[in-house]
Image (cartoon, rainbow, N blue to C red):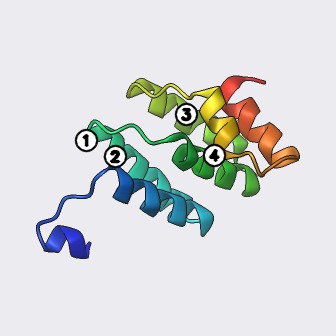
Amino acid sequence: MRMLASGVAPNAYTYAVLVKGLAGDGRLADAKKYVMEMMSKGMMPPAATYAAVFEAFVKDGKEEEAREFQEVMKGKGFAPNEKDVREAMASKRGPVFRSVMRILFGK
């Protein structure tokens, strides 16, 4: 908000940092809002960013809401990249990783 007040528009990196931080804190509503704002400005979130959001959904037990959000994102041109998601989540394995992959890629 301070950036906006100063007349500085956020770029893709700024959005990515903001969204990952919000998702990591479990603030899904805010993370979703800024992902959509980012996309409405023609910027696609990087894999690490959207993986963090979907990981937060899974950790909160909101897999159905995650699928619905993915459909909204797809409506704006979103297409997840499996290789990039695997790289972004390289240090994570187990049920959360499998759930994120299932949501994003049907696996």
Quarter occupied by the C terminus: top right
Out of 10 and 73, give the one closest to the viewer. Answer: 10
Side of 75 relative to 104 (left or right): left
Out of 83 and 61, give the one closest to the viewer. Answer: 83
Q: Which numbered mark, 3 or 1, is in the foreground of this view?
A: 1
Q: Count neighbours of disc 1 (C-alpha within 10 A) and say few if under 14, some if 14 to 19, many if 20 or more.
A: few
In terms of sequence position, does the residue under pointer 1 or pointer 4 come before the other?
Answer: 1
Residue at mark 2 to residue at mark 4: CA–CA distance: 16 Å
Q: Count neighbours of disc 4 (C-alpha within 10 A) and say few if under 14, some if 14 to 19, many if 20 or more.
A: many
Position of 8 relative to 67 (above/below): below
Q: Quadrant of residue 18?
A: bottom left
Q: Amino acid at mark 3?
A: Gln
Identify the residue position indicated by label 1 in the image: 41
Identify the residue position indicated by label 3 in the image: 70
In terms of sequence position, does the residue under pointer 4 or pointer 3 come before the other?
Answer: 4
Identify the residue position indicated by label 2 in the image: 38
Position of 7 relative to 104 (above/below): below
Question: Which residue is depicted at the point 73% across and 33% down?
Answer: 101
Q: Amino acid at mark 4?
A: Phe
Residue 93: give x, y in percent of width and height: 84, 47
Identify the residue position indicated by label 4 in the image: 54
Residue at mark 4 to residue at mark 3: CA–CA distance: 9 Å
